[in-house]
Image: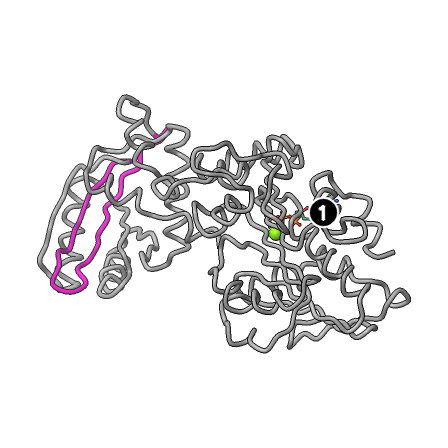
Amino acid sequence: MIPNDRFNSGLHRWQLEILAAFDGGAGRLARFFVMEWHRRARKTTLALNLLIRECVEYSKRSYVYVAPTYTQARNIVWDDPNMLPAYLPTPDEMPCKKNQQKLHVQFGNGSLLNIRGAVKPDSRRGIDAQGVVFDEWAMMKEEAWIEIFRPIIAQSPQRWAMFLYTPKGINHATEMFDRVARISHGQPIPNNGLAGDCIPDWVASRLVASKSGLLTPSELEKAARDMPTSMYDQEIECARVTDEDRVLITSRMIDALRDIHRYLPETRRVISCDPSMGGDECVIYAGENTKIIDELILHERDQMKIAGHLAIMGERHKINTYIIDRIGIGKGINDRLAEMGKEVIPFCASETALVFSIWLRMGLLLTRQALRLSRCWKLSVAVPSFPMANWMT
Ligand SMILES: Nc1ncnc2c1ncn2[C@@H]1O[C@H](COP(=O)(O)OP(=O)(O)OP(=O)(O)O)[C@@H](O)[C@H]1O
Ligand SMILES: [Mg+2]
């Protein structure tokens, strides 16, 4: 059976609404579909099965699935055993050949399903498409649609396009949704399926987790535990979070701490050093949890001398643990302190994954109001500036 039983038996109401609009009896009700659905709402599963169904139903046609990057396309649909491999027809239903290099599936009837990333427009020029799906539409540039696929889809009224996403702030994706659903500024946005009054040829659907019930209470609890509030609202409730809130730690979260006097359960003391990169300052702090207890600003590039200053500060405060940014001359300082028998915690500010995990942890502590920050203006300025967008791609 195509799509197979695994897909058919698990279809949820909002997927059925889209399929009904897609099939629309004799003629198609709509050619263009924009779906703003929460994480794990089975957007990709729906789109992939629709593409496979179309490939099987019509011979010698070409369809395209587009993810933001080639790697994402590969990871999301090609390599995941629960995606493409789980839904392709069996050999006796219709033989299919998967081409790993070209990332396409050739069906026995001559139809082709192409898997593409949006970032290399040239690799998509010359491609044909009877139908195209943009998955994670909010994370790609609009040009992928406007410059490449719109002219192809415009060739015939039978051709179609689908745009799937969970919001990433207010951008081309939410603007498309609002235009299609005729929502003007300040009006309520649907949150439980199809929008009532869409522009001709278009269908818009929006789904938030508190309405869908597709995520179990324990999944929701875990998400609430692991994500800062603004990220939870965006990913789970499809909140169109403003740029100010699209950071791991917002200035509002810091302001809310003003009257809170709760500290980390244990006391940690550490000396940090941000060595100078060019002619700027080499900044050394001794800290006790989030409080700075000593500070030294050096105009010095000699690694041995800086290590000496760090050791003296350590002796003064009985601190043996150091965090040195290893970038540039930091590595030499780091090695010297290790030779002196100090405990040096590895850190490199240019490693974004590491910095993210620190910011994320701080965001969670702040969300739970389990961390008190010293009222240091530098921190208030720097902390909220780390954008979530860097991490959700
Ligand atoms: N009918 C079903 N019953 C149970 N689980 C399903 C069903 N269909 C798909 N899934 C699983 O649900 C998970 C989410 O599906 P999918 O990846 O399609 O959602 P998504 O909305 O694209 O998620 P994301 O926003 O994370 O990209 C996947 O692990 C998928 O295998
Ligand atoms: Mg998906």
Residue lying at 58% horizontally and 46% vertically, measured from the top left: 199
Residue located 78% across and 62% down the image: 88
* Residue positioned 84% across, 71% down in the render: 95
Q: Residue 163, position in %: x, y?
A: 59, 54
Outermost residue toward the left?
Answer: 299
Residue wearing tag 1 = 21
Q: Is residue 270 above or below residue 129?
A: above
The scheme the figure's colours follow is one colour
Of residue 368 and residue 268, the one placed in the foreground of this image is: 368
Question: Is the residue indicated by label 1 positioned so its CB lies within 8 Å of ligand 1?
Answer: no
Height in image: 258 above or below 106? Answer: above
**Label 1 is placed on what type of residue?**
Ala
- Residue 116 % position (x, y): 59, 68
Given residues 392 and 212, the one toward you in this image is 212
Residue nearest the observer in this picture, 194 or 380: 194
Give the secondary structure at mark 1: helix
Q: Report the magenta residues as a range.
A: 264-289
Q: Does the magenta run of residues contain 267?
A: yes
Expressed as whole percent of the image width and height from the top left, the position of residue 218 reads: 62, 32
How many marks the image carries: the answer is: 1
Q: Which residue reaches farthest right?
A: 92
Q: Quadrant of the N terminus?
A: bottom right
**Residue at image x 24%, y 57%?**
337
* x then y, percent, for residue 89: 83, 62
Using the rendered view, name the quadrant where residue 360 is placed: top left
Q: Residue furthest front?
A: 200
**Residue 14 location, quadrant:** top right
Instruction: Please give left or right for residue 118 compared with residue 260 in the image.
Output: right
Near mark 1 (Cα within 10 A), the count class, few <14, some 14-19 or many ≥20, is some
* Near-viewer residue (165 or 386): 165
User: In the figure, 382 relative to 208: above or below?
Assistant: below
